[in-house]
Amino acid sequence: MRQLSIRTFSDVVSSEYRPRQSRATNCVCLFLACFSYFPRICQAQNAPQTQQIANKEGGIRWVMKQYPSLRFGDVLRVDFRARFQADAGSFSPDATPGEPSFTLHRARFGIQGTFLKRFEYEVERDFLDTDHPWRDVALNYRAHRRFEIQGGRFKVPFGLDQLTRITDFDYVFRSRVSETVAPGRDTGLMAHGRFFKRGLTYQVGAFAHDGDNAGTGQRTLAARFTGTPLHLFPAPHRLKGLRIGFAVVHSELPEGLNGLRGRTLSRDTFFNRVFVNGTRLRLGAELDWSSGPFSVKGELLQASDTRHGQGVRAQDLPNLVSRGWYLSGTWVVTGEKKARGLEPRRAFLRDGGWGAVELALRCEELRLGSSSHPGPAFVHPRAANLLGNSQQIWTFGLNWYLNRHTKIQANAVRESLEDILRSPVPGQKLFWGQFARLQLAF
Amino acid sequence: MLPFQHTPSVRWKEGCARTAKLPTHHRRQFLFSAFLLLFLIKSGSAESSEDLFNGSFLEELRLYVHPDDWSQLRIRYLQNNWYLADLYWRGMTAANVGVRSRGSGSRSSLKPGLTVRFNKYVNQQFLGLNELVLDNSLQDPSFLRERLSMLLFRRMGIAAPREAYARLYVNDEYAGLYSMVEAVDSQFLKRNLGENNGTLHEYRWMEPQFYFESHGDDWERYAKARFEIRTSQQDDFGLETIGQMVRVTNEVLDEEFVERVSGFLDLKQFLKQVAVENYLADADGLLGLWGMNNFYLYRFANTTRFQFIPWDKDVTLGNPGQSIWFNTDTNVLTRRVLSHRELQESYLDSLQQTAREAEGWVEEELERAYLQIQTAVYEDSRKPADNEQFERAVAEVRNFVRLRGAYVLDAIERARNQ
């Protein structure tokens, strides 16, 4: 699953940020138990130790490395994966006072592995998400590293932020532009591969709809290319790892109130859906760089929804354009390398270590409005000139990696909205939020 | 270009040269004519709300709503959902207006009554209006009752909405004959009462029926839903003052009644309105069969004085023999007011004056309106009644107009002789 583990079988958070208090209380105990004991179990049975259930030569083996794994010789491998995240947080001012501040946010269990060497699979379910409980359910066939075929339900290849596993994420929340513009998961078929030792990668696929995030588009075609062009030129060694990428997604858009909508971190709507008809075209550009303890990521994403025949006289209206960007930088204060997942040199409460500590900063902006501005701008789903609205967010993060499996994140968020009349608290432009997350993943 | 054709600039220069050669008095005449022509062109294009409600012509309104929205409005005609629309009248456009289904008993899916709000989405007015009501005349198969009633109110000097007929086309399809009704709003108040910074309440009919009886301490809960505030500021003082007026009307002693209640109402003005309603045999007004209904109540700014404003008079001109004292005893306010000899006399005077003003004039207006709308009604396939029923309803109104005056004058004489 090497190929899949970087991007294609990655994870996403598109579920509502809503309280699950009743389950949470019960699950917290389980969570804490796992938090306390699982790392020890795994570390105690560190590679290359394996526990054999049957004989070594091709029988069934139970392996406890980074995660539990069951291996049937070379024929089949089943890795057991689990992810838990518990969040606490609040907004100031709070548009929805009274909601519980501590929730068990994700409880995902899944299996992944290989069979007959060339086939890879993954099945994962979130037991707290009632809207989209099945996350990745996909099968990949690797004919060659340059050409693989993947089918099932997985992420539409668009948006670096969206394609990053939530457990590998530097912040509690994804960027709003990623949540809004990127499609997320869908059912489809995709060809992908890589050349020049990942110097060039491609993903080209067709999907039934345009992802869980938007939830409104129909048949979708997607393509994404990434590469490390500085490998081809004489450049400082540290910069050679700079990866840039471009992606395009084209979806059919049924007539109706199906435009993208803008939502705040608190899931309040600051730009309502508008009437659209025709196609949705997403364009994305991304950069990703890391060197030693430093990393920088950024994206510029845009979605353009056509509005054929949506005017009061059934005339075409200017497109709805949702556009945004983010730029994020991180620094592992304790000096560990950021690339390929951060693992503390000395785990907390083991080897006398304190784990790894990372600082992160992200700024981002998202704006929704008309592509052109005929007549007066106002708020109505059929307005020719949609009165635009935008949000700007600064996120300050502190990540504490206790060990390979456990992470604690703290974020301070400053969110501001352009139109105070469409703010979660009318008249209020600026919101602060503080969030903490406890994560256990294997 | 043809060989003998001049360019416009050459012709303009030649024209100026010829004008300059004219004798002085001819030049003056020429200039005067030119200015007059310019004035007429200008005044012709600058329409106003007076032109819209002029009533001399059958107007034509064109409303453009997205077909999906129009079908949604008709499906959800019981809801007050707003839809975006453009309105055209005499070559003028009100773009980006709000339109919704309206009415209470007159709501219809086939021929919805409509409210057009010009400033719903964009800060704008159309002909100085914020809102225009398009009445579907669902409860008046004659299409005449509402218009004739409002005309009579205004002729009697009572502030009442202006109205005119219009053929309404929705997305270029004939949607039927509608009455354009001036909305009772801040523009209406300014034009009719000279101010609009007081508080306007729209009376919402609901069970139990209201006869101006006191509800004591329970008033606030009782009144909040009925006397809906229509001005932008939320004014609890207005509701409180209505409560005081009702309480005083119910509780004050006879000797103090006129003085105390006059602090809230111009009683003679109020009786004039009651007189016109009773002349019109209004079955659903201040003294309606189902309690008070169909009125606005305006509280003048910084005072406790109120004025009733009539609304929705489509259940009038029915029974020409309806008593001139119809329901005056049932309603606490009219019962107590009319128990005073002087005020009773004032009521009879107003009634007499109404009958005299109406005599002949209402008949003329009726025939004029009938001729104006007959074809449009016949072509209106969405009207609630067929053409035969329309003609029968018109005949009923004609009958009322012919008989009502004599009946009322006779009843007044009998009342005075008692």
Image (cartoon, coloured by chain):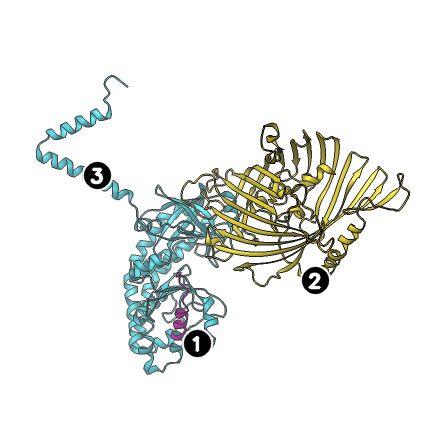
Mark 2 Cα-neighbour bin, 10 Å: few <14, some 14–19, many ≥20 = few
Element type at mark 3: helix
Between the residue at mark 3 and the residue at mark 1, the CA separation in whole angstroms equals 63 Å
Q: Is mark 1 in CB contact (under 8 Å) with mark 2? A: no
User: Which residue matches tag 3?
Assistant: B37
Chain letter belonging to callout 2: A
Whether residue B13 appears in magenta in the rendering, the answer is no
Chain letter matching colour cyan: B
**Residue at the outermost right position:** A55
Residue B281 visible in the displayed image: no
Mark 3 Cα-neighbour bin, 10 Å: few <14, some 14–19, many ≥20 = few
Between the residue at mark 1 and the residue at mark 2, the CA separation in whole angstroms equals 55 Å
Depth check: give the residue in front, B134 or B129. B129
User: Which residue matches tag 2?
Assistant: A25
Quarter of the figure that contains the C terminus of chain B: bottom left
Identity, as a three-letter code, of the amino acid under mark 2: Thr
Between the residue at mark 3 and the residue at mark 2, the CA separation in whole angstroms equals 85 Å
Q: Is mark 3 in CB contact (under 8 Å) with mark 2? A: no
What residue sits 34% from the left and 78% below the top? B339
Chain letter belonging to callout 1: B
Q: Position of residue A253 (x, y in %)?
A: 58, 39
**Shade representing chain A:** yellow
Chain letter belonging to callout 3: B
User: Which residue matches tag 1?
Assistant: B214
User: Which of labels 3 and 2 is toward the front?
Assistant: 2
Identity, as a three-letter code, of the amino acid under mark 1: Ser
Q: Which residues are magenta?
A: B230-244
Q: Do callouts 3 and 1 point to residues on the same chain?
A: yes
Quarter of the figure that contains the N terminus of chain B: top left
- Residue B174 image label: none
